[in-house]
Amino acid sequence: LPAADLSSMLDVMAIIEFRIDVEAASAALAAARRTEQSLRQMRAALARFESELERGSTDTLAHDVEFHLQIARASGNRYFFDVLSQLGSAVSPRTRLGSAEIAELDQIETLRNVLNEHQLIYLAIERQDPDDARAAMRMHLSNSRERLRRAHESSARGE
């Protein structure tokens, strides 16, 4: 997707809606097909994300994207990985929000919530529970869409 195609908040929200179904299916397949190696790669991405938060850093985007890509890879269907790789970090809700829109403390709290959501996805995949993995991913991306919507509305009101 050209960056120009993601020029508005509505475009980014539409991509998140697309990702909800695609990544929910990817997570379900990952739960059914995951290997010990794929679990290690997901855990490593989660650990790097968590480490940044423990240091008080909000620089977690690369680890967030990597976690989602590792799930897509674990699905065993290269098209999930290819599509998510093409989307990359440009469609992450966080790339649409500047520091003026969300206070640093709010960012840390939001990222803790994101990490918790990721951990629920991971646990379902680890248990090899496709239904829970699908539901956890759907909830995570739905929450991301809602967080983006709220932040955008707050910014538009000048809060």
Image (tube, grey):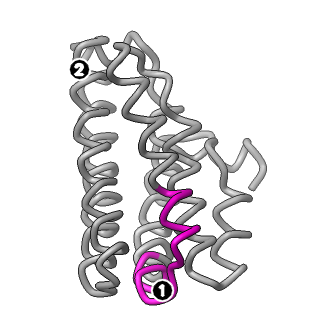
State the image quarter where residue 72 is shown: bottom right
User: Could you tell which of marks 2 and 1 lies nearer the N-terminus?
Assistant: 1
Query: Does 23 appear above or below 128?
Result: above
Tell me: 16 left or right of 38: left
Query: Does 34 appear above or below 47?
Result: below
Seen at 50% across and 78% down, the residue is 26
Residue 77: x and y in percent read 65, 85
Q: Nearer the viewer, mark 2 or mark 1?
A: 1
- Helix, strand or loop at disc 1? helix
Seen at 70% across and 80% down, the residue is 79
Q: Is residue 40 magenta?
A: yes
- Type of amino acid under label 1: Leu
The residue that label 1 is drawn on is: 29
Location of the C terminus (image quadrant)? top left
Seen at 73% across and 42% down, the residue is 3
- Helix, strand or loop at disc 2? helix
Location of the N terminus (image quadrant)? bottom right
State the image quarter where residue 115 is shown: top left
- Type of amino acid under label 2: Asp
Query: Does 17 appear above or below 4?
Result: below
Residue 80: x and y in percent read 63, 75
Extreme residue toward the front, this view? 36
- The span shown in magenta is 27-42
Badge number at residue 106: 2
Tell me: 45 left or right of 100: right
